[in-house]
Amino acid sequence: MKNKKVLSVLLAAAMAATLVAGCGSDDGKDNASGDSGKTGSGDVTLSIVGIKSEIYDQWEAMQEEYTDIAGLKGFEMQVTGDETIYSYMQKAYAAGNETVLAMFDPTNVYDFGEQYAVDLSGESWVKDTDWAISVGDKVASFPFCIEGRGIVYNKTAIEKVTGETFDPKSITSLADFTALCDKLVAGGMKSPAAIAQEDWSLGAHLFTLAYEQQDFTEEGTSAFIHEIVDGTKDFATNERYNSVMDTVDALRKYNIYANDPLSADYDMIASYMADGTIAFWFNGNWAWPNISEYVTDESAEFGIMPLVQDTSADDKANSMISGTATKQIIINNTASEAEQQAAKDFLTWLAEDDAGKSFLVEKANLVSPFNNNTLENSDPLSVSVKQHVADGTMYPTWNRAPGDHLTVVGGAMQKYLADGNRDALASSVVDYWTKNVDKIG
């Protein structure tokens, strides 16, 4: 989820003289050898854009491996630079130079899926997941990974400073959270928290809790957006908006970048999280590759807890994190038939082949959205998210915000980090939705 670095990679492998056609063994069983990826498409080059920056290295290695397995001419990865995938694809579609595959945020599947996505309803992997997105009558996307978001915590650091066992389930309100932060400060952890300043983190991940937690359903969230636009509900005085922002204010108070919140450096925050300089960071399990680069104590324990609020004791916000299949792959229907088939074979390999399953879970450290993938995650944040799923303490993320929501509302949140003007933030949000409510149906 970090801002993308400018990169363009073309990985090619020589075509084998004789290729095995088809995808998967005849009996549908997993194929540990990787032969299930063979397509016989020696003249086909696959291309994709939008890969998660945290897994660039793993993806590049997998591309090279899969190019050889499938007998492709090549496999090209493009990146968006500093552009959002929404903006990048708008230009690509207009120019007619879109990639064969595109990795989208869920909202972008709704933006582009009806017009451009190949129908994947007939693919064998559909039966093994509940996380694909349908647009109209077609399955428009392949779910790539499940991610959850909340307050990332360093359990080991908390226990070292307080001298007490830390159970995240014991923190059930904002009062509990601030009391713990005060105890950490008293113990020598000067600033126990951090807030990333990136617009995608603020606009797409943090602020959307104020919508989603109205009733914790996607339908209810969409209805609430309509209500704040037509005036049925006043956003500035909304209880949930204010309880979320009360917790944001607590994070601002204990923020290691409190004196200059827009100078926050994502990689530095990851290092602070790893070495115990801070204990809390609102983020998701996608942050582990960044954190893990700086972890020196392999026994250190980390996890994800809810963004707790000072609301009622039975409020779901105090026991649940938000999550979904945050990355979805579509096949563009502008690709040739051979490219479309090769792309379908690749997605089936990711979902059903032992090597594809291993890539997702063991190499890329992602939580698989497929029921037939029983491999265990090793990174602590993914383990935490998977446990939330198993415990029923992850509610569905709302995925219908337009592609520019993260930049516009994220920008308003950046301003809020600096000035704390809650009424101005509410006004900016209502103004945005007044102009864009028709985009969510």
Image (tube, rainbow, N blue to C red):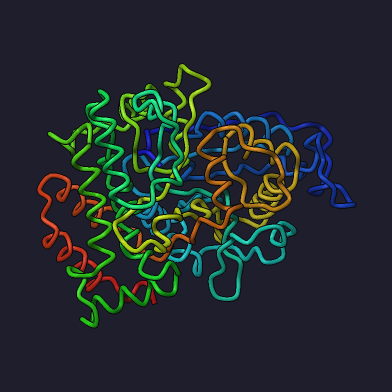
Is residue 355 positioned above or below 248 on the image?
above
**Quarter the N terminus occupies:** top left
- Left or right, 2 with respect to 194, comes to right
- Residue farthest toward the front in the current orientation of the protein: 164
Residue lying at 47% horizontally and 26% vertically, measured from the top left:
292
Residue lying at 16% horizontally and 36% vertically, measured from the top left:
258
- Residue farthest toward the top in the current orientation of the protein: 296
Q: Where is residue 368 in the image (x, y as percent from the top left)?
A: 62, 47
Q: Position of residue 6 (x, y in %)?
A: 37, 33
Please state which of residues 332 and 308 is positioned toward the viewer in this rendering. Answer: 308
- Residue farthest toward the right in the current orientation of the protein: 27
Q: Quadrant of residue 75?
A: top right
Please state which of residues 347 and 157 is positioned toward the viewer in this rendering. Answer: 157
Q: Where is residue 127 in the image (x, y as percent from the top left)?
A: 72, 62
**Quarter the C terminus occupies:** bottom left
Q: In which quarter of the image is residue 226?
A: bottom left
- Left or right, 235 with respect to 146, comes to left
- How many discs appear? 0
Please state which of residues 330 and 171 is positioned toward the viewer in this rendering. Answer: 171
Q: Where is residue 35 in the image (x, y as percent from the top left)?
A: 80, 38
Residue lying at 84% horizontally and 52% vertically, measured from the top left:
28
